Amino acid sequence: MGASSDDLGSLRGKIASLPPRVNLGGYLEWQLTPRIDVGGSLSHDINGAGAYLKLYAEMEPPSIGLLEQSVALRWQAMNAPAMNRFFGVSPQAAQALSVPAWQPGADGQLAALEYDLFLPTSRRTGVALVLVYGRLLGDAADSPLVTRYGSRTQLSESLAFVYHL
């Protein structure tokens, strides 16, 4: 599902695009050892009813020369309004798409494995690479938008130039 109508592809005009939302929340993190952290965050849409919970465990294996790395396991959940925003199918959209209407409840939404690399290029700069393999869970995975038009497997990669002040 796209953030704008241009991102919707074949679903354009059949389902609503996702307007931007601002989330506020907080997080807690515990450093179990110098190389292992666990934590979580809880946030809420300030102009909607969506609530989001994220839990993670992150480990930093030894560096390979200058190359810093980390591996993280993540789990995310949403309340029913948030699940409906992202994965629900209204009766009108269901008719336009020829799929059943779908109103998911609160549930786990995603489990993911993340691998991060960081290569410093100077005292203040570096290049970061993030690879994420995720799997949609529960009602999110069972949504007709996912089973008919998407995939339960969620892959993403990011490459960034980093500048530290």
Image: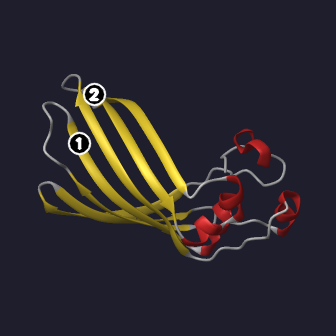
Quadrant that contains the C terminus: top left
Q: Say the numbered circle drawn on residue 69.
A: 1
Chain-order first, disc 2 or disc 1: 1
> Could you say where residue 162 lies in the image, as x and y percent from the top left?
33, 30
Q: Which residue is drawn at 33% across and 34% down?
A: 128
> Could you say where residue 152 lies in the image, as x and y percent from the top left?
56, 58
Q: What residue type is labelled 2?
A: Gly
Q: In which quarter of the image is residue 89?
A: bottom right
> Could you say where residue 44 lies in the image, as x and y percent from the top left?
52, 65
Q: In this view, does 150 lie to the left or right of 157?
A: right
Circle 2 is placed at which residue position?
Answer: 126
In the displayed structure, 48 sits above or below 119; it is below
Q: Which amino acid does label 1 sit on?
A: Gln
- Colouring mode (rainbow / by chain / secondary structure / one colour): secondary structure
Q: How many marks?
A: 2
Secondary structure state at the residue bearing disc 1: strand
In the displayed structure, 21 sits above or below 103; it is above
User: Residue most toward the top?
Assistant: 122
Asked if one can make out residue 49 in the rendered structure from this viewpoint, the answer is no
Q: Which residue is drawn at 71% across and 73% down?
A: 103
Q: In this view, does 122 lie to the left or right of 150?
A: left
Q: In this view, does 8 lie to the left or right of 158?
A: right
Q: 163 or 87: nearer the eye?
A: 87
Q: Which residue is drawn at 15% across and 35% down?
A: 64
